[in-house]
Amino acid sequence: MNIIVTKDYKELSKKACEYIEEQVKGKPNSVLGLATGSTPLGTYQELEEGYRSGSADYQDVYSLNLDEYVGLDKIDPQSYHFFMNKHLFHSINIDPDHTYIPNGKASDLAYECERYEQLIEEIGPPDLQLLGIGQNGHIGFNEPGTSFDSETHIIDLSASTREANARFFNSIEEVPHQAVTMGIKSILKSKKIVLLASGEEKAEAIKRLLRGEQDESFPASALNKHDHVTLIVDEPAYKQAKL
Ligand SMILES: N[C@@H]1[C@@H](O)[C@H](O)[C@@H](COP(=O)(O)O)O[C@@H]1O
């Protein structure tokens, strides 16, 4: 694993932006695997600024998002569709028809999982997958205990994940209990992976990841199986790992 330690969140966001821009400049029809959560927000902001200043062009880019809450409509402000439109897609010149996110409102969720996995095969796999990490080590919405062999599937969200994500909702009761997520095997199909971690609350997870184990009780440890992972981590999230 290639590790880049940055002074703070701002520098982390700039680094992640540089990686994505390099990818898109080198291959204008790149497939980007994209993530939600607070961590990539700074990266998306930098991408927007880069686009406005002409440093990258997204007209031929495709994107595949990791996950979506079950039961939320695309126009629901808490959905990941809404998040991506608001924080990235509406700010750059990506073709909306080239952006893919699982449909959490599909009437047949099992079929939706198969359809999405098929899409990953047809459009992807991503040239570059951006990832965040949950405090319990989840990637996408793959909770502890998820098989490293999993493809896109429905997951029951853990109490700790629902609590951590409740800040985006009016109350914890509103946080969905399930999500559609790319599986660990789906994520590992990506050619390159860039994992972002910022802040002290991620320090324990980063310390555990960097022990190098591969253990299904800690989903992010599957990344230790992949040959092209870059961890971009700020000092507060990295400091435990140094001890
Ligand atoms: N499904 C997302 C993950 O993709 C994300 O990595 C995680 C951490 O989020 P944050 O970056 O807000 O800490 O939150 C959610 O659960």
Image (spheres, grey):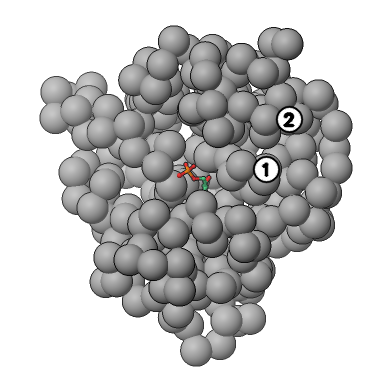
Q: What's the CA distance linking mark 2 and mark 1?
A: 8 Å
Q: Which mark is residue 209?
A: 2
Residue at far left of view = 52
Residue drawn where x is 21% and y is 42% of the image: 92
Q: Position of residue 4 (x, y in %)?
A: 55, 13
Q: Position of residue 45 (x, y in %)?
A: 26, 33
Task: Give the side of residue 45 with respect to residue 125, left or right.
Answer: left
Asked if the residue under mark 1 is in contact with the one under mark 2, i.e. CB atoms within 8 Å, the reply is yes
Label 1 sits on residue: 137
Three-letter amino acid code of the residue under disc 1:
Gly
Q: Kindly state the secondary structure of the residue where label 1 is placed.
A: loop
Toward the viewer: 61 or 6?
6
Quadrant housing the C terminus: top right
Residue drawn where x is 61% and y is 42% of the image: 135
Residue drawn where x is 81% and y is 24% of the image: 211
Quadrant housing the N terminus: top right
